Amino acid sequence: MSVKYISTRGRAPALDFGDVLLAGLAADGGLYVPDRWPVLSPEALSGRPGRGDYADLATEVMWPFVDGAYPRARFDELVRDAYAGFDHPEVTPLVELGDGLWLMELFHGPTLAFKDIALQLVGRLFDEELTRRGEQVTIVGATSGDTGSAAIEAVRDRENIQIVILHPHGRISEVQRQQMTTVDSANVHNVAIEGTFDDCQDLVKAMFADSAFRAEQRLSAVNSINWARVMAQTVYYVAAATRPGLEQVSFSVPTGNFGNVLAGHVARQMGLAIDRFIVASNRNDILTQFFTTGSMAITEVHPTLSPSMDIQVSSNLERLLFELLDRDGIRTAETLEDFRQTGQMQIDYRISADLHREWCGVRVDDAETTSTIADLYRETGMVIDPHTAVGLAAARRIRRGSDGPIVVLATAHPAKFGDAVEAAIGECPPMPPALAELADRPERCERLPNDLSAVKAHVAHCSGHASQ
Ligand SMILES: *Cc1c(COP(=O)(O)O)cnc(C)c1O
């Protein structure tokens, strides 16, 4: 029997995979989760099913979540196509650092950050589902850097999708801008807003809040709460933990929205042998509080060297909370409603005591991030990015001599955060050819004032549904 999806807030109808894919958020404000955890097949647990490559493992691991939505051969084709563009044959290669520490490189996709692993597949699944329904959508999003380019690369040239990405004019790095604006595809529309990232986000929220506009323009999003993104990320946990020598492995995961590490939890729920998750945060340490004390309180967001983790409220934590509350949607909804109103949350001490066996939260500040990059470079000649450095510093702090191996998830290529790396090691990380070439390409971008009606008119123009 195929899996159905239920809301973490218990008041939305159960849906099939295709509906969940396009819906994103549930109608009651909750997030979708499978109604039960499928068990990993013996083939998946062998780590090398089929032809023994990443795509076959991915199909095997994800199949129970999508069974019924696609014929298996078609799903297999979409998965294979999604990972064909990665620049490493293993897709997510493991590198041994010594002392029981490993790095798993998740940055071999087209935009050199881990979001490609989920989005390259999700873009294809979206297009497939829209074709089946004979529908078209316009994806609208705001970016402070990484997410926008990963989303653009994921849906460029897809027939049924237009994508409009807002970024703050002059406030993202050259490389980040070029990764978006040099994409030469008719369905990709970049907008530089004369304002801040918050202004961009407010404009996007306002467009989604206008239900008439939203329906007329068929607005859609591919944000990190989308179940399909979590699903696609479970695969590399299986790839790592089934490798000989990495039995009972722990993972150290540099975390922002909690999507990456939650995927590891899902893999464990499916029967994968994992010891612990180290939830690594930068100075924005609300998750460290949660995993050490069982409580959390919202404060302001501080900018750090690892900007993709500069988040206060990690939306995917809701999925773990739902599990901790025995899948009681009503209690989950109450807890989150209360958190929203008071800015504080305290979970039952028994639940919190349980958490310590499998999770631990570690906070790493900018100084330690920099020294971690510098130390690794001095010891091994390897260069890592600041997000990965947060994960590595956390793993080193937690690891005691007797512990099992720890895999640190390397979430971005160092060249994407060249300034922070240069400050740590005194030189620029080598630029991969794919990034270096961008500087010579023509850029396409519309510059607009921070003005809702101007932006709406532009979105309508891009979507081909211009309002009267
Ligand atoms: C998005 C991102 C993260 C955080 O991932 P979450 O799933 O939000 O926890 C970490 N590192 C990099 C480089 C990212 O782009």
Image (tube, rainbow, N blue to C red):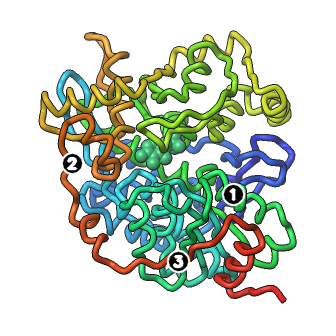
Q: Residue visible at 35% across and 60% down?
A: 109
| Tag of residue 24 | 1
Q: Given this view, does label 3 or label 2 mark the residue nearer the observer? A: 2
The answer to whether residue 153 is left or right of residue 130 is left
| Dot 3 amino acid type | Val
Residue 103 horizontal/vertical position (percent): 28, 37
Quadrant of the image containing the C terminus: bottom right
Residue 337 horizontal/vertical position (percent): 83, 34
Question: Circle 3: is it few (<14), some (14-19), or many (20+) Cα within 10 Å?
Answer: many
Q: Which residue is mark 2?
A: 429
Q: From the viewer's perspective, is residue 291 above or below residue 430?
A: above
Q: CA distance from mark 1 to mark 3?
A: 21 Å
Q: Residue visible at 48% across and 68% down?
A: 154
Q: CA distance from mark 2 to mark 1?
A: 37 Å
The answer to whether residue 249 is left or right of residue 14 is left
Q: Which residue is mark 3?
A: 188
- Tags 3 and 2 in contact by the CB under 8 Å rule? no
| Dot 2 amino acid type | Pro
Quarter-of-image position of residue 194: bottom right
Quarter-of-image position of residue 189: bottom right
| Tag of residue 403 | none
Of residues 215 and 457, the one nearer the viewer is: 457
| Mark nearer the N terminus (1 vs 3) | 1
Mark 1, ligand 1, within 8 Å: the answer is no
Question: Circle 1: is it few (<14), some (14-19), or many (20+) Cα within 10 Å?
Answer: many
Residue 206 horizontal/vertical position (percent): 78, 61
Q: From the viewer's perspective, is residue 183 above or below residue 64?
A: below
Of residues 40 and 133, the one nearer the viewer is: 133
Quarter-of-image position of residue 111: bottom left
